[in-house]
Image (tube, rainbow, N blue to C red):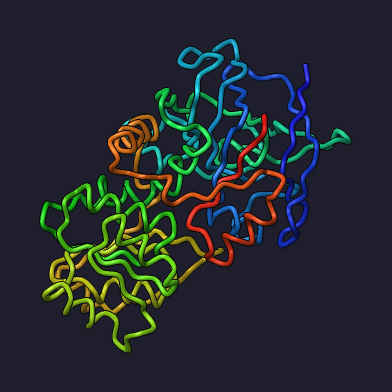
């Protein structure tokens, strides 16, 4: 039995997404059909739409989805029709990294999340003319009113979590919070500097407050985000263009250098600034995704001083363990996702994309009237 959905289709890299009617074929035994209630727009979606991530076109993007299970395959055991779920990245759950609790570094990560098809080469979406559309983007392609996922990347939500706002937990917010709470693990009274106050950076700010850091400095040229960063936990917010030597200024603010830095931009200049902001020793986590290869150079003397530069994907977390923890933190008022979000009806996709590209909103969430 084929089902129809409305999806935002990328036909050509760099071209506007087009709302189209698509069809979803019968589920495989391990698959789950989710009616999407809300999906966040992530910077990675924009990078992919511009051709910076190698998903083949035509394709349906979207990887911060949340919704309600409407159908399950015959081999599915942990989810049932009616369950509210948030969708994370996909992983095989069988390789060495997956079995030791690090699915963000799954040996099959690229194929499962960027390949555009199932492992046998078939697709989960077709256009109105019956032609294949590449999907499975981060295991979901949730810029669609229906998404085909698996138990591997669908996490049941507590009943009191707003489904329409939960999607960003699955990627951007988990990346920022996971980097702080699972990778850096700052001790109370630590100092931390966060470069880039998008959703990832704001999540890192909130996580630093949860970790009881006493000095939390946010860096962003968009002054419209400074007050929100302070509300979420930043003790100081700095515009980088106001300082000729930003690293020196940050070392003064932190009494000799920060213990930790989170770099959520990905450009060479910002990575170097983040390293320069550290004390000795100190750790900088770089998270920002740039299109294609992104070579950078760093000053080796920064590293000789006991400093570490480490890269992090998806917060180095297991969605099945970490996303329920974020939901609990939201319930306790310690991770107020709603303060980051502005919702847009899915039919207003272009308005939402414009707001994201301009920096007008921290996290745009597309909602479905279904």
Question: Does residue 47 appear left or right of residue 210 in this picture?
Answer: right
Residue furthest to the right in view is 129
Q: How many marks?
A: 0
Residue furthest to the bottom in view is 244
Residue drawn at the location 68% of the way across and 50% of the way down: 349
Question: Does residue 368 appear left or right of residue 164 in this picture?
Answer: right
Q: Is residue 228 above or below residue 268?
A: above
**Is 23 or 110 nearer to us in this picture?**
23
Residue drawn at the location 80% of the way across and 41% of the way down: 20
Residue drawn at the location 72% of the way across and 40% of the way down: 7
Residue drawn at the location 85% of the way across and 33% of the way down: 130
Find residue 42 and report its horizontal and vertical position in percent. Answer: 53, 52
**Is 49 or 6 nearer to us in this picture?**
6
Kindly indicate the quadrant of the structure image that contains residue 104. top left
Kindly indicate the quadrant of the structure image that contains residue 145. top right
Find residue 318 and report its horizontal and vertical position in percent. Answer: 36, 35
Find residue 181 and report its horizontal and vertical position in percent. Answer: 25, 46
Kindly indicate the quadrant of the structure image that contains residue 357. bottom right
Q: Which quadrant of the figure contains the C terminus?
A: top right
Q: Is residue 273 above or below residue 349?
A: below
Q: Which quadrant of the figure contains the N terminus?
A: top right
């Amino acid at each position: 039995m084929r089902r129809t959905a409305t999806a935002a289709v990328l036909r050509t890299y760099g071209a506007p997404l087009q709302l189209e009617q698509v069809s979803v074929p019968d589920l495989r035994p391990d698959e789950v059909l989710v009616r999407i209630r809300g999906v966040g727009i992530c910077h990675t979606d924009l990078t992919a739409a511009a051709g910076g991530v190698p998903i083949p076109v035509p394709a349906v993007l979207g990887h911060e989805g949340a919704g309600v299970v409407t159908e399950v395959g015959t081999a599915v055991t942990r989810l049932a029709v009616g369950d509210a779920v948030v969708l994370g990245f996909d992983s095989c759950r069988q390789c060495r990294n997956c079995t030791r609790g690090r699915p963000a570094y799954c040996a099959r990560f690229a194929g499962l999340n960027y390949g555009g098809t199932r492992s046998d080469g078939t697709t989960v979406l077709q256009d109105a003319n019956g032609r294949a559309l590449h999907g499975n983007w981060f295991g979901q392609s949730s810029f669609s009113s229906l998404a085909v996922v698996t138990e591997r990347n669908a996490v049941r939500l507590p009943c009191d979590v707003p489904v329409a706002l939960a999607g960003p937990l699955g990627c951007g917010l988990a990346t920022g919070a996971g980097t702080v709470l699972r990778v850096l693990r700052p001790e109370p009274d630590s100092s931390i500097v966060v470069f880039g106050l998008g959703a990832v950076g704001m999540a890192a700010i909130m996580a630093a407050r949860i970790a009881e850091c006493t000095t939390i400095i946010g860096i962003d040229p968009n002054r419209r985000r400074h007050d929100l960063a302070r509300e979420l936990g930043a003790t100081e917010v700095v515009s980088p263009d106001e300082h000729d030597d930003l690293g020196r200024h940050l070392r003064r603010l932190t009494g000799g250098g920060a213990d930790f830095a989170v770099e959520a931009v990905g450009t060479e200049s910002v990575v170097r600034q983040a390293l320069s902001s550290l004390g000795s020793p100190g750790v900088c986590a770089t998270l920002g995704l740039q299109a294609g290869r992104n070579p950078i150079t760093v000053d080796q003397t920064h590293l000789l001083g006991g400093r570490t530069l480490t890269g992090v994907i998806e917060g180095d977390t297991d969605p099945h363990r970490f996303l329920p923890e974020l939901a609990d933190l939201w319930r306790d008022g310690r991770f107020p996702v709603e303060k980051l979000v502005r919702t847009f009806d899915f039919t207003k996709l272009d308005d939402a994309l414009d707001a994201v590209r301009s920096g007008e909103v921290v996290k745009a969430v597309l909602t479905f009237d279904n």
